[in-house]
Amino acid sequence: MPEPGATVQRTDLPLLFSLRRPEPGRRDRQPGSRWTVAPVNRIDIRPCPVVEAGMADFSERLLAILDICRELNAQRDLPVLLDRIAREAARLLEADRASVFLLDDEKHELWTQVALGSEPFRFDARLGVAGSALATGATLNVPDARIDPRFWPGIDERFGYRTRNLLAVPLRDHTGRAMGAFEVLNRKSGAFTAQDERLLEAFAGQAAVAIETAQLVGELERHRDELRSENDRLRHEVEDRFSVRAILGSSSKVQKLVRIIEQIRDTLVDVLITGESGTGKELVARAIHQSSARARRPFVALNCAALPETLLESELFGIEKGVATGVDRKAGKFEEASGGTLFLDEIGDLGLAAQAKILRVLEERNVRRVGGRRSIPVDVRILAATNKDLVAEVKRGTFRADLYYRLDVIHLGTVALREMREDLPLLAQHFLDAACREHRRPRKTLREDALARLRTHPWPGNVRELRNEMQRVAVLAPGRSVGAGDLSEEVRTVGTEPSTDTRHLDGVLRERVEALERGMIAEALATHRHNRQRAAAALGLSRQGLLNKMKRYGVGTTPA
């Protein structure tokens, strides 16, 4: 160190230091001390003009890189980002041009989306100085490209360019994985220096971060767009499948049902839906939900008849953790449907205790989980359905009158299939088309003899039974034209013999069915010149079945 009182000239670092050694013979070590500076020592600190100028330029370019990187990290458009990186690298290193090569792992190719003065280009990742930098992970300084064996002239030949010298560094992501290479070409004065190497390494490290971020953002945006598109597609599919448009039929009863649904679309009143099994009560409930202001909110369905009484309460209202061994906290259907619609199917099968708890929730709009101490507010629209006569159930004392009147704000009755036979051809073909699409079968059409057989079937399972029949036809019918013989045996035979259970038929309907069958038998016999075997096949009957009907209706007395 300089002795006290010495004058030291200070300049901006970095500096070149010079030390004047002590005169010969002088002691520089004193007893009891480690090192001392002799009084005659003198330290001269003088700046070195050449080094000072070079380091100042290096510092300025480093600061410029920091300023550029702040802008690069804010850029999310990858093509724009790569173009900016290449231009700034060429400017900072005083080069003619720069190229950013990104690695395609699947094809093991390097591709450049931006190369100043050129077009996007792909090549084998093992080629060229860029490929060597990628493979070795080292910075490569090529002072004369013409004599360097690593140089690949393919790019120069492609774009009519002449590379004299170049500097290449690898690009790596945050995990250290190779993601590409970075080149600057043709320094404007002389060859690239060691200082240029350090600058490009520093710039490449920051550029890699910006590139990786832009790639990640781009991938997330693509995923977001794909999810939005898929969500829109699924929403439209749900709307088509469960909207009012999905309720097919031109009969007066069906149209009346559709009109009521349209009338209540802007309200949030609770609805009670009644009807026989298989008549589409859940389809009606979904149509009400989809046409309401809650269409974008949850639709939660619960079949009350499918759960034992011991589990029903926890399913409806939820349960707290620790109520029983191994039980975790779970929200109930009321909470899941909050903001949307809760569909309680087969509500007529609920016990009186569960009915009382549901009534309390409907009145208070709060639920308390099993084992819970606090009330949780819920905003739920209730749609309830049953195939039972709730008025009769109330009289018998198996259904609470107060709950019935609470649910029965709007009462909708679904239509049994036998009450809309004029719509049966439309429904059958609709279900057959849907089944063919689902099972990837060519489209099939129903012939008149098949439709006639479908019209006479009693359909105790209603629309559900018809849909299942069309599923079977779509899979098993051999041709594209479906005749009566392609229908299931039950559909072909049930209704052709006198039935012991005619509770579902009234007198008028029986007369119409008999008149239809009589006319079809007479027509078939006339068409096939009273050949009973062929007529039976055309009608989808056995020969004995046809004989029985002929005897019953007194048709076809001419011998076969």
Image (cartoon, grey):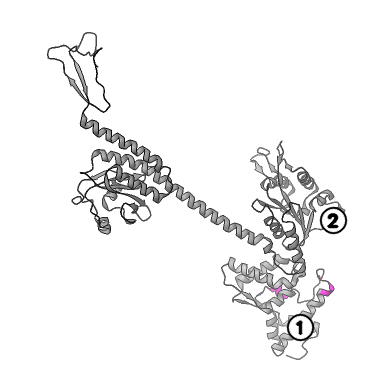
Residue 80 vs 14, above or below: the answer is: below
Image-quadrant location for residue 554: bottom right
Q: CA distance from mark 2 to mark 1?
A: 42 Å
Q: Position of residue 59 (x, y in %)?
A: 30, 34
Q: Which residue is mark 2?
A: 391
Given residues 122 and 99, the one toward you in this image is 99
Residue 300 left/right relative to 458: left
Residue 233 vs 96, above or below: the answer is: below
Residue 63 left/right relative to 358: left
Q: Which residue is mark 1?
A: 519
Q: Secondary structure at mark 2?
A: helix
User: Does label 2 or label 1 sit earlier along the sequence?
Assistant: 2
Q: Residue at x 82, y 68 (%)?
A: 503
Q: Position of residue 333 (x, y in %)?
A: 69, 47
Residue 532 vs 388, above or below: the answer is: below
Amino acid type of the residue tagged 2 in the rendering? Val
Residue 287 left/right relative to 131: right
